[in-house]
Image (cartoon, rainbow, N blue to C red):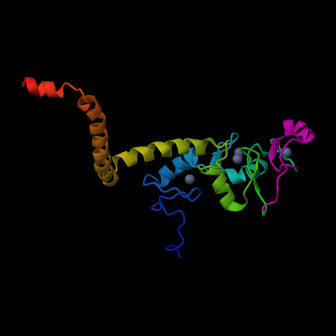
Amino acid sequence: MDGDLSPSDPEDKTCIFCGAFDKTFTDSGLDLHYWKTCPMLTRCHHCRQVVEVASLTQHLLGECVSSSEYRRCERCSEAIPKKNFHSHALAKSCIPAKPEPIANHCPLCHENIAPWDDGWREHLMPGPNTCLNNPRAWQQATKKTLSSERSSSVSPATAGSNASAAGSSAAGVLAKTRIPGTGTPGTPRKTFTRRR
Ligand SMILES: [Zn+2]
Ligand SMILES: [Zn+2]
Ligand SMILES: [Zn+2]
Ligand SMILES: [Zn+2]
C-alpha cells in the first residue's frame, strides 16, 4: 500500500504548490523553497508558520495563535485585526468578496481574482497578471529573467548557430561601413598605389 501513493516522495523534487522542479529540492531544499521563495506560499507574521496565500485568511481566523485578534469582515471576507475592525467595517471601502464559483479574494492585494486553484496560480505565480503585493513572485521573476538570459548566451547549440549567422552579418555590416571610408571617390588610394 505504500508503493504507489507517495505524493511527498523526497525524490520528487517538485513543489506541490507551484509545480516548480529543482534538483536541489530534496527534503531540506523544498523546506527552504516553502520557507522563502514559493510564490504560492507566505509566512504568517504572527506565528511564522508557512501557509498558502489561498488559506491565509482561514489561518488567521482559525489555527493561528493570534486568531483571537482577528474577525472576519462579512463584506471582503478577509481577516481584519479586531482593533481596526470598526473603522474597517464603517468605511465600507473594502472590495466585496465574491463566492468561489465566481472569484477568489486575495488577502495580499484585496482584489477579487479568477476562481479555483487555477485562479490562485495565475494570480500568485510570476507572469503578466501577478499580484502586486506578492513579493515572492517579483523576486522569482527577476531571478528567472537573469538566469534565462545567462543560459541562452551560454547554451552551446544556439550560441553556435547564432554566432555563425550573426558573425557573417556583422562582418558584412563592418565591411560596408568600412568601404565609404576608404573607397569613396577621390580617396588617396590611387595616389597611394602610384607612390608605391
Ligand atoms: Zn513552490
Ligand atoms: Zn499564524
Ligand atoms: Zn472588509
Ligand atoms: Zn493579490
In the rendered image, residue 116 lying in the magenta stretch gets the answer no
Furthest toward the right, the residue is 90
Residue displayed at 44% across by 52% down: 24
Name the image quarter holding residue 83.
Answer: top right
Q: Quick one: quadrant of the C terminus?
A: top left
In the rendered image, residue 96 lying in the magenta stretch gets the answer yes
Left or right side of 152 for 63: right
Residue 51: x and y in percent read 66, 50
Above or below residue 185? Residue 10 is: below
Furthest toward the left, the residue is 196
Residue displayed at 34% across by 46% down: 154
Residue 64: x and y in percent read 73, 47
Is 70 or 127 nearer to us in this picture? 127
Residue displayed at 27% across by 29% down: 181
Is 80 or 118 nearer to us in this picture? 118
Furthest toward the front, the residue is 186
Left or right side of 151 for 44: right
Is 137 or 8 nearer to us in this picture? 137
Residue 106: x and y in percent read 73, 49
Q: Tell me which segment is drawn in magenta.
A: 75-100
Is 111 or 129 nearer to us in this picture? 129
Residue 137: x and y in percent read 59, 45
Left or right side of 55 for 165: left
Above or below residue 95? Residue 191 is: above
Above or below residue 4? Residue 86 is: above
Residue displayed at 71% across by 61% down: 116
Quarter of the render that holds ligand 3: top right
Number of numbered callouts drawn: 0
